Image (cartoon, rainbow, N blue to C red):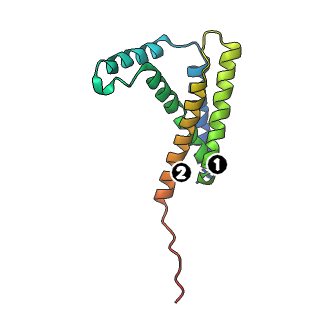
């Protein structure tokens, strides 16, 4: 299922570049105060209800990081195909590791965290698994031939 047409590859390259630009902006740029504030507000709101009190800031931040890396997995499968979907884990780990290392070494206003590494890698894997699974579901199954 990798994209093979010239037009498809151009569109895929544009989508990949756009995703990486947004990702860099969110992870390497100045920490937007509204993001943390929004998650804190949501955590407080969920905390007011007994059934959703488990949705704390830490949980919401983890889920946000998973969602942030879903597109990486989606794009990964579009580039390399469904057979190697699981390599999105390595891509997610490598990209997230580079981001966290940059935050630790060069961005004093950012806070690198091992949980981000885990969440980002999980997001890439989930994104790739979703596309690979959807592609598999959409394909006709082969039935074994019966010799008579």
Residue 107 falls in which quadrant of the image?
Answer: top right
Q: Residues within 10 Å of mark 1 (few under 14, many from 20)?
A: some
Of residue 121 and residue 84, the one placed in the foreground of this image is 121
Relative image position of residue 61 (x, y in whole percent): 48, 23
> Which residue appears farthest toward the right when viewing the image?
105
Reply above or below: 105 against 118.
above
Relative image position of residue 130 (x, y in whole percent): 49, 46
Local secondary structure at mark 2: helix
Report the side of 83 relative to 47 (left or right). Answer: right
Report the side of 48 relative to 93 (left or right). Answer: left
Count the labels in the image. Answer: 2
Quarter containing the N terminus? bottom right
Question: Mark 1 or mark 2: which comes first in sequence?
Answer: 1
Relative image position of residue 84 (x, y in whole percent): 64, 50
Q: Which residue is mark 2?
A: 132
x 60%, y 21%: residue:
113
Of residue 65 and residue 21, the one placed in the foreground of this image is 65
Q: Residues within 10 Å of mark 2 (few under 14, many from 20)?
A: many
x 61%, y 47%: residue:
86
Report the side of 132 relative to 107 (left or right). Answer: left
Local secondary structure at mark 1: helix
Of residue 109 and residue 74, the one placed in the foreground of this image is 109
Relative image position of residue 102 (x, y in whole percent): 69, 19
* Nearer to us: label 1 or label 2: 2
Q: Which residue is mark 1?
A: 80
x 28%, y 23%: residue:
50
x 55%, y 31%: residue:
119
Q: CA distance from mark 1 to mark 2?
A: 11 Å
């Amino acid at each position: 299922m990798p994209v093979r047409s010239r037009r498809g590859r151009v569109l895929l390259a544009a989508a990949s570049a756009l995703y990486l630009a947004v990702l860099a902006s969110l992870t390497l740029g100045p920490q937007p105060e509204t993001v943390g504030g929004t998650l804190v507000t949501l955590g407080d709101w969920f905390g007011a209800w007994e059934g959703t009190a488990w949705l704390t800031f830490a949980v919401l931040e983890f889920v946000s990081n998973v969602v942030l890396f879903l597109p990486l997995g989606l794009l990964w499968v579009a580039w390399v195909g469904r057979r190697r979907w699981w390599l999105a884990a390595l891509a997610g780990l490598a990209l997230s590791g580079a981001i966290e290392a940059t935050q630790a070494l060069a961005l004093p206003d950012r806070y690198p965290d091992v949980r981000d590494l885990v969440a980002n890698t999980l997001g890439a894997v989930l994104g790739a698994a979703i596309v690979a699974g959807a592609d598999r579901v959409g394909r006709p199954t082969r039935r074994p031939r019966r010799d008579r």
